[in-house]
Image: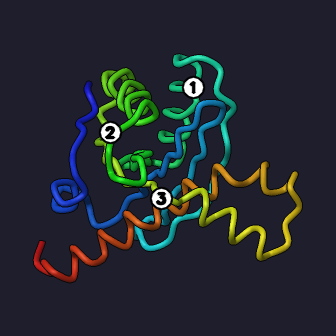
Amino acid sequence: MVGKITTLEELAPSLAPKGRLMGIDLGTKTIGLAISDVERRLASPLETLKRVKFTPDAQKLLELATKFEIVGLVIGLPLNMDGTEGPRVQATRAFLRSLAPLTDLPFVFWDERLSTAAVLRSLIEQDASRAKRAEVVDRMAAAYILQGALDRLTSLKSLHPDA
């Protein structure tokens, strides 16, 4: 049982017509989670996990993946603005290398540049308090990341309707 790290383009043809994806915004103190509907059209914020240590973090994440019958994981990749990889990307890749042997779910990295900034801007426009923003930003960023991947899946499907 080892999860495969792949691309969205490689994953798309192997996905069953219905099944939820989980979006993950991996931070240093929290893990934001989001899930899609079974038709993979809409991402919804799920919850924010407080980071403890790898093992309990991974167990909780995989428990939720089982509970919601997740068929694949979309992990936000925190690239630098110029597209280069820094320490946060290395930490994200290390987390995934440790998680992969614990599940057979496929993993897809998704560029998360500006996801948190976009979510914060939206929350500020909605006049959400600072406390409310802090409470929801990680899971909303996970939904933002996942929605980007879902939109890409939809465009891949329109390019290859027989796939």
Looking at the image, is 148 positioned above or below residue 8? below
Cβ–Cβ below 8 Å for labels 1 and 3?
A: no
Tell me the residue that label 3 is attached to: 145
Position of the N terminus, as image quadrant, is top left
**Amino acid type of the residue that numbered disc 3 sits on in the rendered structure:** Ile
Tell me the residue that label 2 is attached to: 105
Residue 148 placed where, x, y %? 42, 67
Work out whether mark 3 precedes mark 2 in sequence or the reverse, and give the earlier one.
2
Relative depth, front residue between 15 and 54: 54
* Residue under the image location 64 percent in, 49 percent down: 138
Q: Is residue 105 left or right of residue 113?
A: left
**Which secondary structure, mark 1?**
helix
Q: CA distance from mark 3 to mark 2?
A: 18 Å
Work out whether mark 2 precedes mark 1 in sequence or the reverse, and give the earlier one.
1
Looking at the image, is 1 positioned above or below residue 119? above
Residue 4 placed where, x, y %? 23, 36
**Amino acid type of the residue that numbered disc 1 sits on in the rendered structure:** Asp
Residue 131 placed where, x, y %? 87, 51
Q: CA distance from mark 2 to mark 1?
A: 16 Å
